[in-house]
Image (tube, helix red, strand yellow):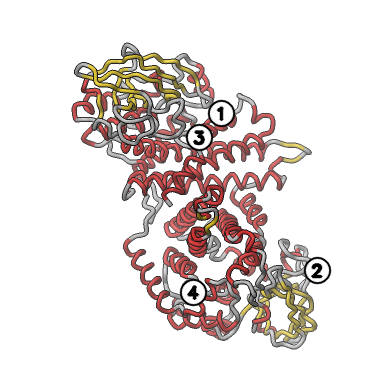
Amino acid sequence: MDLNYSTEELAFRDEVRGWLASNLPADLRDKVAEYKELDREDLLRWHKILAKKGWVAPAWPKEFGGTDWNVVQRYIFEEECGFAGTPPLIPFGLAMCGPVLLRFGSDAQKKRFLPRIYNGDDFWCQGYSEPGSGSDLASLKTKAMREGDHYVVNGQKTWTTLGHYGDWIFCLVRTDSGASKRQEGISFLLIDMKTPGITVRPLILMDGGHEVNEVFFDDVKVPVENLVYEENKGWTVAKYLLGHERMNTGRIGGSKRELAKLKEFAGNQVFGGKTLMQDVRFRDKVARVEVELMALEITNLRFLDQMRRTRQPPGADVSMLKIKGTEIQQALTELMMQAVGPLAQPFRPTNGSSDFDDFTAGLAPRYCNFRKTTIYAGSNEIQRNIIAKMTLGL
Amino acid sequence: MNFDQTEEQQLLADSVRKFLARDYDFERRKKIVASAEGYSEPVWAMFAEMGLTSLPFAADDGGFGGGAVDMMGVMEAIGEGLVVEPFLATTALGGRLIARTGSAAQKKAILPALIEGRLKLAFAQTERGSRYDLAHVATQAKRAGGGWQLDGEKCVVLGAPCADKLVVSARTAGNTADEKGISLLLVDREAPGVVLKSYRTLDEQRAADIEFKGVKVGADALLGAEGGALAAIEEAVDFATALICSEAVGVMKSANDTTLEYLKTRKQFGVPIGTFQALQHRMVDMFVATEQARSMACLAASKADTAENADDRKRAVSAAKIRIAEACRHVAQESVQLHGGMGMTEELKVSHSFRRLTMIAQQFGDLEYHLERFSRLS
């Protein structure tokens, strides 16, 4: 047993770290560090920098621009990005639609969409959830009726992250309402968001941020060639996507960075002649999060080691990374807010500014915003269901 | 980076597991616990034969030269079987202190016999007022004649009732809580003036309070440098802490396995209770807590073997013990709760796992003690 990275892995980490240090634009770095909203241009700018370097889609096959990195290198890369505080790579194209097309797409679809996803020419979003279908995704109702060489789509999607930036959306739609099992009548469609009949309506979250949307489809015509895989086989595609590459759900690099920031920040908060980090009650809370994070990092490495050895994707128990990772992220935002005490009250909306100082006034909204992490991407309760059923056999 | 066990580590853990499954099932363990000695001499002899007692000692001392990482699998198996034999007291505490501080002659006098299973040790450290502070030593050792005279009291010395010899921490200079002035003495358990009051512990092991009344030992009883024993004591206790982290993982695994089995078989309202989501999620949390604990047990063992310095080791061991202490209590409490009334009874192993987990959570420093040490070093 050896918990340390090998010499080669350390060299790779240093290469990534060095490159990030000199290629992450200062204005983007500052925006991330100050918890400011990143707009479409910010996100795509970083995407394009990585695309130019050839690092934007490490997991893709080499012929489509992948890096040929092993699972450990991919993990190191993602953690280093998190630790450096880069803008996020929006996963809908690179980590979702891309892998689906690589696995299920026709040659024409691959040729048409993959280079544009890779280069960040199109902004993709995800059309899964509906008002009546959250955790119970297979109950979705948005309908696609075949009419000649088109599908006509009617219905509503919701929680569409960054849908207001979207050029394209991949959707799960019902193509056969009479199927005996409800999973069997679902198809996977690619929809151009400029098509007439699509309306995007913002859902403003409690931190004042515009991040998610409702998307309405009213007689939207989608060419049949935008169907991925077979009609009524969309659930197979969706399941593949859910099981695909769930190794970065712990967000360990990002949490390490936030922890270091919290310790430094709390170490500078002085009251009653001592710093907040000298206050035992506060310090112990920080220490407990730090220990959870240390444990999670090693647990994550154990999964990677197993994947590397067996050349198999992780088992269902990998859901624990999402559960613990999001709990840690939430705890960190909560402590950061608590660190400023009564000064947490002034409010800066995510996309705005405050007459108080912007950083401090952004801490409580950030705490509010991070409540999403245990709800999205399969709520933590769903993750527990998965482990209970698949790992424990309950 | 790899988490592989070597073939040797795997084989040894497997052979311990096999032996325990055959000769140390729950019923046999009950009899051992109820016996006058509270441990089994044949089991101990078997441990020696399998090489467990030689595992952590250097080849020069007649051992295998293994570290904490090499002992992880064994400790996990010991945890699964809820072994009560004084393995930790003899090898990880007493034996390690002698191996680390003893002269060639002292090692030769003790370690071969220990390795062959003919000699057991205990480490007399804790005192009424010391809590977990290893520097708090009030027991006095004064020069007398050509040797030393020992006076004072130790309490809850694990494994003492069956130990042949005691490694005793005593103050040879300074005040009660000073870091300097602590020495280690090797004392015969049956020496005149050594008075034991033996008892059972909650987790069915044996311990004793020991009074030293003018106990005379020779100059050759001093282990290591006079007054400079604290670093070695801290190292040995950290080593033992790393080992009980792995033991805890084994106990938790056993508690989880039996709880999961119970959820699948116990029926109420016409269905297995494991179909209830309220219970499923709690079972998942026990499982996740155990995996997180396992990760930290890896860290503790690894740093016990390869830390760059004492602070690096202490910080990692404390971090591990924080996570393990929490997981011990969580898994213990939930495993009993999910068993319902049956979990309360002596008849099921799970209540015995509960007791061992409860004690591990507080052994060698509880959550709060290690939070303090971890924070100080972070």
Kindly indicate whether the residues beneath marks 4 and 3 are on one polypeptide chain: no
Which one is nearer the viewer's eye here, B316 or A1?
B316
> Can you tell which mark lies on residue A131?
none
- What percent of the width, then of the height, locates residue B321? 47, 42
| Inter-mark Cα distance, 3 to 1 | 16 Å
Give the Cα separation between the discs numbered 4 and 3. 49 Å
Q: Name the residue under label 1.
A: B352
Q: Circle 1 — which element? A: helix
Identify which amino acid the numbered label 1 is placed on.
His
- First in sequence: mark 2 or mark 4? 4
On the image, the x and y values in percent for residue A270 come to 52, 58
In space, the residues marked 2 and 3 are separated at their CA atoms by: 61 Å
Residue bearing the label numbered 3? B362
Q: Observer-nearest residue: B60 or A329?
A: A329
Q: Please indicate, yes or no, whether residue A104 appears anywhere in the rendered image.
A: no
- Which amino acid is tagged 4? Trp
In 3D space, how far apart are the residues under numbered discs 4 and 1 (Cα atoms)?
A: 51 Å
Please determine if labels 2 and 1 lie on a single subunit: no
Q: What's the chain of the residue with tag 1?
A: B
Return the chain for callout 2.
A
